[in-house]
Every structure is written in structure tokens, then in C-alpha cells.
């Protein structure tokens, strides 16, 4: 639904609520699709949310809590009576219900679990971290025994009411519950009714351990175009499934985190506008302070060359230009390498090849910048020796930035540090201090200061 | 499959090929899953690729060409006879076949189309740009008429052999081919055999126009958890479907492009290590030159204050520190806002709210930096007036960087320029020049120079 239409609906819902016409507001909300319901709902005043949610159908209420950001859902849920909350939790997908319970106060979560009709599936999920395969999976899946016939399997499927996304792939297990194959609904329909599942299933099924990281799930599903990934325990017993809509969320979240880290900020836990100013500042201040401290090295380098700078004040005019160019060249390289690492196109074994690639690219770019810098310095009326020093520095600094920019992310990755953290602003700061050193040393030599 | 195992398989395949044991190599490759087949295949020497591909089954050959990067697939295809290529194209998903034909020389593409058994579906796709909904869709879908019974529909489904991903949602059309609903295979199985599709289908189906951008498809599918998105023409006639595996590719590509642009480089068209050094340099040089030219404004600012700098050379020591901090604060803000824009959490209508949010965050961060900067300057043995100037500049520059960093991406987006382009390095350059101006003006006032 278009944002404009959604805004109109929100205005109408608000108008109904102001006039205490709950039924009118409910009719409007129930006509929306779940993500739109959540968008409208989260814009309402908390007192209105509290009145509204119990009056919506349990299914709509469950959809809204599923669609809200985790923290928002927890806030809404913390204001509901346990008698209202428990049936909504029962209706939610078990992974979403477990995430929500994990965000509530422990005594509230225990109280809600006690009142739930079917707490078993959710309770089993509470042991897994949110960002593991076990935390992503739902326990709503159909495990069929391999000695069942196709006709028996179809009869079971007809009795079954899963979420739409979970219904296409069915998993086949041994007597002891170990995963041994998968069959799509389409193949099941096409198979002879008397065939055994063991004969029609695909035994080469891709699966993951419950303790694996969510990024590993995402990479596996994206690479092999897996729509439903079965999750197993250490003895390959089927515990749950991860559906492709979860994969999409993981991919978006991981890209968001990478982009925020590249910008030098810790990942925000909520949507931007729902994050308080204090939170926003808090996520950034540590990094900003750290970079400030490392950046003071540039001051030390400049002090070291105080005599040179006093003798030729025109040297200072080029400082921001030179370190800026070095920083830019470094950012170009790190951004490229970080993304290549994230999508699995390079890894540590490619370090020499990457270094060689970037050294040559840095040489080409450095030569181009040196030529342009030389011309620019002369047209600015700079003396020939200074123009030469600037030009030589540009070549050296771009080459150096490319070499560092290629190594840093790979080394960080090797040391199991997120490469997005060490790069971006940190890269610029490193190149700034070393770049200044290169510049002033060159100038000292060429200008004989 | 683990990278290590894959490398061993590659070594074995190479050994077989060196010994002219084609059958051995083929057996190994055929045992792999398609993405692994493609990974092994692309590492082989072109002459080996050329010998191998026609000897693999048509299905494996089609899978490999589908999985290779577009440019690599075109290179391989350009070396095959048309008699070999045509049946492989017939076997490929129509969207992939159309992409491949679009990358071949026109006369080769025409020749291949002429030899294909079923060129119609592919030809229909050639008119759409690669990055539009029409370019993403496949024409392998089942359109069922709304007056069909469930039993008739199931009979049709049993005759049908689509790709696995395309088989779960079936689309329902009117007599004139207009899309009017969708039904999942699961719901079809559960429905009474004599019901009409018009009664069991979900009429509230989400669809997209063929000329829509791929980003719009991705946003729609991600938001509404759509597994199969129907693509229609202007009169809502069903043209094709987009499956969720295409969505995953689009999301990854868009995130890659954003990260590369944030780093100040044009998106690479191939995997990093398959991109030549010249290409890598070419994608970066324009941006680096442009930033160099804008960065020369910092030199002009410094020249303007030449008298001030000569009078107090210690002023220069703080230049990289101050503009570095401003640049870092600006990058933090732009990265956050750009991602919020990309995932649809903010848009132009939020501009005032975002500006106010960032102004307050900037004030907080600026105060923290000013305090730290003041202490650092004093412990460095700087005079009190200069320490005050540095401290005041830090407050002003961080506030200014946050304000600019919040406006720039939103304005760019409003002007339909990719916000990732104007930010990152460009933001630093802008903040550098204005930051210097703020610094030296403050210093001039406070130090009375």
C-alpha cells in the first residue's frame, strides 16, 4: 500500500479513536494487510494501543506484534493483561513468540507462559540466542515418516494448518526423528499414491545445526536457493524450520549493520526515528572519541615537523587536500573489500592476490592524482619544488592507502573482528597520520628545509 | 558445501582434465549442486570449459550458465556452437536465458533464438530492461481460469513441471487473462474438489507492473513476505512471476551497490577478483578526481587565513584532528540516514524531524568532543586561548556535520539522486572546507589575530 494511502488511513483511525468510535477504528485496521496494520498501530498513542489491541481479533493482534520491531512489541505486550497476552502468544509463530517473551521481564514471561494453551514449542525455542539458527526457526513444521505412503502423507497435509510460507516443503524423518529427506508439495501431488515417501523424497537435503549463526543460515539459503531450511540438533534430529521470509529479514539486518558500522556507528536496535536522540548519540560517541584520540597522532606528526611548517607556511595549505585524497582512496578500497568479504567473493586465502590487485590499482590512481595535483599546484602559483613535493606525495599516499585498505579488512576478518568496524573512519584516521608523515618528509627532502 | 571440499573437488576435476579423462571430470561435476558446479566450472581454463559444457547434460549446462555471473556466462556462451547453445537456452529459466541473450552479440543472439525450440517466452522478455520487474520475471507460470474447479486445477498442476520455486503459488485469471487472485498449492489440496477457483482463491493478491524498478519489487516482496510476485501489464494481464530467490539476489546486489557507492566507487559489474585492475581503477578515478577538485577549496580557505596561520603555526597542528572529527561525525549521520532511506524507515516528509533529531544528537556529541578536546589541548601544552578555540570549533563542527549529514541524503533522494553517491567521501570533503572556515574564524576572534 502506498505511504500516502496509509497516512490517510492513520488519520481516519485517529479520528475514530478521538471520537471513542472503537468499532470504526477496528474495521479500518482489520481491512489492512499485517505490515500495514503494524505501521498504523505503532503510530497510535500508547493509551489507544492498549485499548485497541485486545479488541482486535487474536489473529490480527498476533500479526501486529509479529510485525512490530522487537522493542516496540515488548513495550505494547508489557501493557497487556496476561489473560489477553497469552492467547495472542499462542497465535503467533513460535519463533516470534519466543523473541517477544525473551524481551519481557522474566516474571511477566513466566506468567504469560503459564497461561498459554501451547507453551511447549515456544519454551523449546527460548534456549536459543535470537541470532542463531535455533532462534530463527519456528516449530510449526510437518515431519513425515519415510515409510508413509504418498496418500497417507496427503491426508496428513490436508489436516494441517501452517503459516503459508511453511507449507511448501515437507520434511521426512526416520523412526528416531532424524532428518532424511525433503519433498515439495508439488512433487507429492505428482507422485503415485501408493509410493513410499522414502522413494519420492529428495535425500540430498540441505540443513543446519541449531547453534549455527544466522549469517551462516542466510548464506546457505541464498547460495542454494533454499526456501525452507530444516534445523537439526547434534544427532540430526529435526527441531524446526527457517522460512525464506526470515532469510530476507536477516539479509536486510546484516546489510544495515554493515552500512552503519562502515559509517562508524554501532547498529541501532530500532528504526531510526524510534531511536531516542540519547540512544543515537550513545551509539556514536564511543567511536567518535576513539577516533579523536587516534587522530591526535596527526597533531604529533605536525609538531614533529614544526620547523618545516614554520619555514614554509604554504605547506599547510595542502594538508587537508592530501590527507583527504588518501582517506578517499582508502575508503574506496575498504568498502569494496568489505563487501566482497560479506558476500563470500574473497577470503583470507586471497590476501596476496587482493594486495597485488590493489597495489596496481593504487599505482594507476596515484599516477592520475599526481598529474592532476602537479597541474593544480602550479596554476595556484605554488613554487615548482613544492608542486613536485605535493605531486610525489599524492602518488605515495594513494598507493599506501590502497595497500592498507586491502589488508586491513582481510586481517580483521582473519582475527574474527567485523571488518566493517576497523574500516571507514578508522581507515581515514590511519591514513591521515601516515600520509602527513610521508608528505612532510618528502617536502623536507625536496625543498631542502 | 565447504570451501575446502570444493577446492579439493576442483583439484580433482583439473587432474582428470589434464589426463584427458573427460568422463571422470563429468562424473565429479554432475554430483555437485548447481552453485557448486558453477564455482568449479568458472575456475577451469576456457579451453576446458569449452570441451566440458557440451558433454554435461543439458540440464547441468543450463544450471551452470544460470549460476555464473552474467559476464562470465556470456563469455562461455560466446564460445559454444549455436547447435549446442540453443537447447541449453531452452532449458534455462526464461529470465536467465533472456539476460544471457542480451549480453551476446546481436547476430549471435538472433542465431541462437532461431535455433531454439521455444523462443517465444524468452523473446517476450527481451524488451524489458534487466533491472525492471519484467527483466526479473520468468514466463514459466501456471495461470488458471477462475471458473475451473479445484479437481480440474489439480489435474493441470500434475501435468506441469516448473522450477521448484515457481510451484507453490498458482495464479487465477479472468477470461481475458487479467489477474484476479492467487491460491497456494496447500489451500488447493485442502479445498473441496468441486469448488471453483474463484471461490477458494485469495482475491487480495499483491502484484507489480512489468515496468517497475527491481528495487520496488524487492521492497514489496520483503514487506509483505511475498514468495511469488505476479507481474502484469498496464491492463493487469498476467505476464510472468518473480520468485523469492530473485528477490534475495536483488537485495544482495542493492546492498553491495550502496556499500560501494558509500565508499566512493561506482559499483563493480563482476566479482571483485574477476574485475581487472584497470576496471577497478576506472570505477574509482572519476570520483577521486572530483573529490580532489572540491577538496582544493580547503586550500583556498587556508590561503585566505594565511596571515593567521603564519602568526600562530600551532593552529595548523589541530587542522587534521578537527576536520577528521567533523568528517567522522558526518559519516556517522549519513550512513544512518542512507540506510533508513533504503529500507523505507524515513522519507522526505520526515526531513524536519530527522534534522531536529540530528541537531540534538550533534549538540550532545559536540559537547562531549569539546570537553575532551579542551583537556587534550591543555595537556599538550597548548595556550588557554587556543585550547578554547579548538574546543569551540569541535562543538560547532560536530553540530554542523550532523546537520549537513542529515539533510544531504534526504535532499539527494528528493532530487532522485542516489543518496549513497553524495555521501561518504563527498560529505567529508564538504565538512572539511566549511569546518576549516569555522575553525580559523573562531581562532582569529578568540586569539585576536
Image: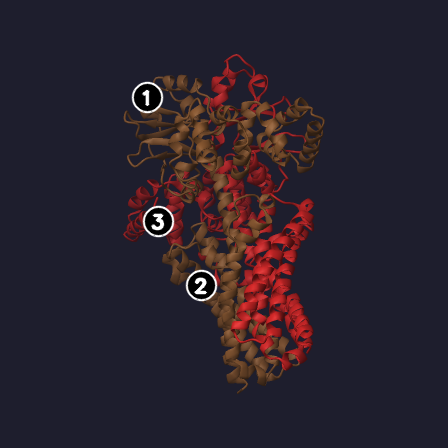
Chain colours: A brown, B red
Tell me the element at label 3. Answer: helix
Disc 3 to disc 1, how far (Cα)? 35 Å
Report the label total. 3
Tell which of A134 and B104 is nearer to you: A134
| Badge number at residue A357 | 2
Chain letter for mark 1: A
Name the residue beneath numbered marker 1.
A196
Chain letter for mark 2: A
- Residue A49 picture location, percent across and down: 61, 31
- Residue B114 picture location, percent across and down: 53, 40
Is residue A338 depicted above or below A358 in this figure?
above
| Badge number at residue B105 | none
**For residue A19, which quarter of the picture?**
top right
Disc 1 to disc 2, how far (Cα)? 55 Å
- Residue A160 picture location, percent across and down: 44, 20
Q: Are marks 2 and 3 on the same chain?
A: no
Q: Quadrant of the N terminus of chain B?
A: top left
Tell which of A330 and A314 is nearer to you: A314
Disc 2 to disc 3, how far (Cα)? 22 Å
Name the residue beneath numbered marker 3.
B3
Q: Are marks 1 and 2 in contact (CB under 8 Å)?
A: no
Amino acid at each position: 500500500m502506498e505511504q500516502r494511502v496509509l497516512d490517510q488511513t492513520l488519520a481516519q483511525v485517529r479520528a475514530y479513536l478521538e471520537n471513542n468510535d472503537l468499532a470504526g477504528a477496528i474495521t479500518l485496521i482489520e481491512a489492512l494487510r499485517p505490515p500495514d496494520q503494524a505501521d498504523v498501530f505503532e503510530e497510535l498513542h500508547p493509551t489507544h494501543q492498549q485499548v485497541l489491541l485486545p479488541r482486535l481479533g487474536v489473529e490480527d493482534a498476533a500479526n501486529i506484534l509479529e510485525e512490530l520491531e522487537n522493542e516496540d512489541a515488548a513495550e505494547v505486550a508489557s501493557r497487556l493483561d496476561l489473560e489477553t497476552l497469552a492467547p495472542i502468544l499462542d497465535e503467533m509463530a513460535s519463533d516470534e513468540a519466543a523473541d517477544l517473551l525473551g524481551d519481557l521481564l522474566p516474571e511477566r514471561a513466566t506468567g504469560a507462559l503459564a497461561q498459554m494453551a501451547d507453551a511447549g514449542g515456544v519454551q523449546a525455542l527460548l534456549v536459543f540466542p535470537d541470532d542463531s539458527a535455533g532462534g530463527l526457526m519456528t516449530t510449526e513444521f510437518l515431519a513425515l515418516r519415510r515409510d508413509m505412503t504418498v496418500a497417507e502423507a496427503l491426508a496428513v497435509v490436508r489436516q494441517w494448518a501452517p503459516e503459508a510460507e511453511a507449507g511448501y516443503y515437507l520434511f521426512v524423518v526416520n523412526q528416531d526423528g532424524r532428518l532424511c529427506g525433503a519433498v515439495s508439495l508439488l512433487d507429492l501431488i505428482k507422485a503415485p499414491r501408493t509410493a513410499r515417501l522414502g522413494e519420492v523424497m529428495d535425500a540430498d537435503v540441505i540443513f543446519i545445526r541449531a547453534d549455527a549463526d544466522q549469517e551462516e543460515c542466510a548464506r546457505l539459503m541464498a547460495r542454494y536457493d533454499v526456501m525452507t531450511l530444516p534445523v537439526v540438533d547434534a544427532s540430526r534430529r529435526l527441531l524446526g524450520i527457517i522460512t525464506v521470509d526470515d532469510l530476507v529479514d536477516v539479509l536486510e539486518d546484516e546489510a544495515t549493520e554493515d552500512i552503519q558500522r562502515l559509517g562508524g556507528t554501532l547498529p541501532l536496535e530500532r528504526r531510526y526515528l524510534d531511536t531516542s536522540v540519547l540512544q543515537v548519540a550513545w551509539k556514536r560517541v564511543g567511536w567518535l572519541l576513539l577516533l579523536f584520540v587516534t587522530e591526535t597522532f596527526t597533531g604529533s606528526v605536525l609538531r614533529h615537523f614544526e620547523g618545516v611548517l614554520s619555514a614554509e607556511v604554504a605547506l599547510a595549505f595542502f594538508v587537508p587536500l592530501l590527507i583527504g585524497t588518501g582517506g578517499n582512496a582508502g575508503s574506496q578500497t575498504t568498502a569494496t573489500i568489505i563487501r566482497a568479504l560479506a558476500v563470500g567473493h574473497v577470503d583470507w586465502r586471497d590476501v596476496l592476490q587482493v594486495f597485488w590487485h590493489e597495489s596496481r590499482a593504487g599505482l594507476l590512481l596515484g599516477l592520475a592524482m599526481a598529474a592532476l595535483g602537479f597541474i593544480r599546484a602550479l596554476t595556484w602559483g605554488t613554487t615548482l619544488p613544492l608542486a613536485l613535493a605535493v605531486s610525489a606525495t599524492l602518488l605515495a599516499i594513494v598507493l599506501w592507502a590502497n595497500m592498507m585498505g586491502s589488508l586491513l579488512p582481510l586481517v580483521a576478518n582473519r582475527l574474527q573482528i567485523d571488518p566493517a568496524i576497523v574500516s571507514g573512519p578508522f581507515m581515514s584516521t590511519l591514513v591521515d597520520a601516515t600520509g602527513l608523515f610521508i608528505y612532510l618528509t618528502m617536502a623536507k627532502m625536496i625543498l631542502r628545509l
